Image: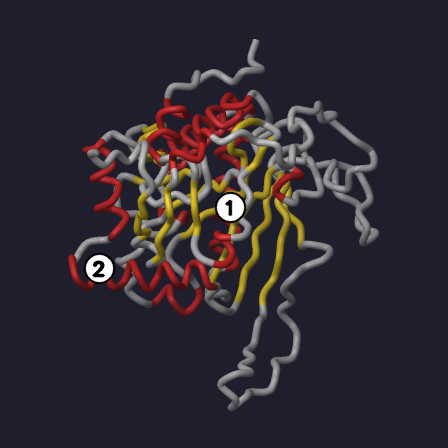
Amino acid sequence: MDFSTEDHQHCRFNPLKGEWVLVSPHRTKRPWSGQVEPSTDEEVPEFDPRNPLCPGVTRASGEVTPKYTSTYVFNNDFPALLNDVPGPPKSDDPLFQISEARGTCRVMCFHPKSNVTIPVMTISEICTVIDKWIEELLILGKEFLWIQIFENKGAIMGCSNPHPHCQIWASSFFPNEPACKDHHQREYYKRHGRPMLLDYVEKELQKKERIVVKNDDWVVVVPFWAVWPYETLLLPRMHIQRLSDLSSSQRKSLAEIMKAITIKYDNLFKCSFPYSMGFHGAPTGIKLQEDCSHWLLHGIYYPPLLRSATIKKFMVGYELLAQAQRDLTPEKAADQLRNLPDKHYKSS
């Protein structure tokens, strides 16, 4: 019997994180009798007077959200990080280490209407979102080492508010995920003299096996080492280290490809597709003065859905105790996404 990636289990290596993922494609044939989630295609009203992210509504803090007409950023009323706090005492015990954690957390509303998500926004509106991300990155990056922009879309991803928004957490410390990527990209750069992800995107463009959408500046692939069923990686086709390095034309093409991939997602199961997404780029703060040539800016989409709009992938058991495992090959996932219509399923 000859080995086939589409039929036989195997492990794939993620060079960005130094981790392995088990791929078990034959498991997609098993019947499902487990948890079924509520529908993610419920209609969201354009305005809800009880929704604190809607213009003119009073939030839990007592602050009134202004009647904004575009994007709107405000300090999180219940932040995980505060800046003006005392630091903990140092510990000499290797088993009980503690360190300072300062920062600030902001919320950014994409649009004044609650029923307007990224895939149905105009390119101009998405460009405004990107411009605001960069503005916040430049401001917060003067002080903080890491600026994490992220969007949790859908209740299944823990989003408690259906209004289209993201969060921006700035921290004095280097969080685990980007710190791990920093290490592996740096080691690759030392050995090969080129950014790991720039080599990777060029090889993906040659292979054409996992590409979902692309344009002159960007490409979206289901990465070779993907963990989540329809996980994608958004990569620039040139050496860009941070969002703030983008030209106006590159911002526009980023808006275009973000709209394209999220339309594909919505069209897959004909629902408002849930995900957690964010950007990783070179660190800021004191690192702005250092050489970060090993870094390549990239966006990550982690969607939980596996078989339908109501059946998700569970990261439990083996995944928690051993290593990540997926049932669908990245090539199959990319093929499914790539062949979906480019027009949103709700478009007239």
Depicted 338 relative to depicted 325: above or below: above
Q: Where's residue 18, x and y in %?
A: 33, 59
Question: How crowded is the residue under tag 2: few (<14 C-alpha within 10 Å), some, or many (20+)?
Answer: some
Query: Which of labels 2 and 1 is toward the front?
Result: 2
Q: Is residue 106 left or right of residue 262?
A: right
Residue at disc 2, secondary structure: helix
Quadrant of the image occupied by residue 55? top right
Query: Which residue is the site of mark 2?
Result: 189
Q: Where's residue 251, x and y in %?
A: 40, 37
Q: Residue at x 44, y 26 (%)?
A: 260
**Label 2 to label 1: alpha-carbon separation:** 28 Å
Q: Is residue 168 left or right of residue 331?
A: right
Query: Which residue is the site of mark 1?
Result: 133
Residue at disc 1, secondary structure: helix
Q: Where's residue 343, x and y in %?
A: 47, 16
Q: Is residue 51 left or right of residue 121?
A: right
> Which quadrant of the figure contains the N terminus?
top left
Q: Residue at x 28, y 64 (%)?
A: 291
Q: Where's residue 329, x and y in %?
A: 36, 35
- Out of 329 and 1, give the one closest to the viewer: 1
| Colour scheme | secondary structure
Query: Which amino acid, by three-letter code, is at mark 1?
Result: Trp
- As drawn, which residue projects farthest toward the left? 192
Q: Sequence-wise, which precedes: disc 2 or disc 1?
A: 1
- Out of 247 and 76, give the one closest to the viewer: 76
Quadrant of the image occupied by residue 314? top right
Q: Residue at x 44, y 35 (%)?
A: 27
Q: Residue at x 45, y 48 (%)?
A: 279
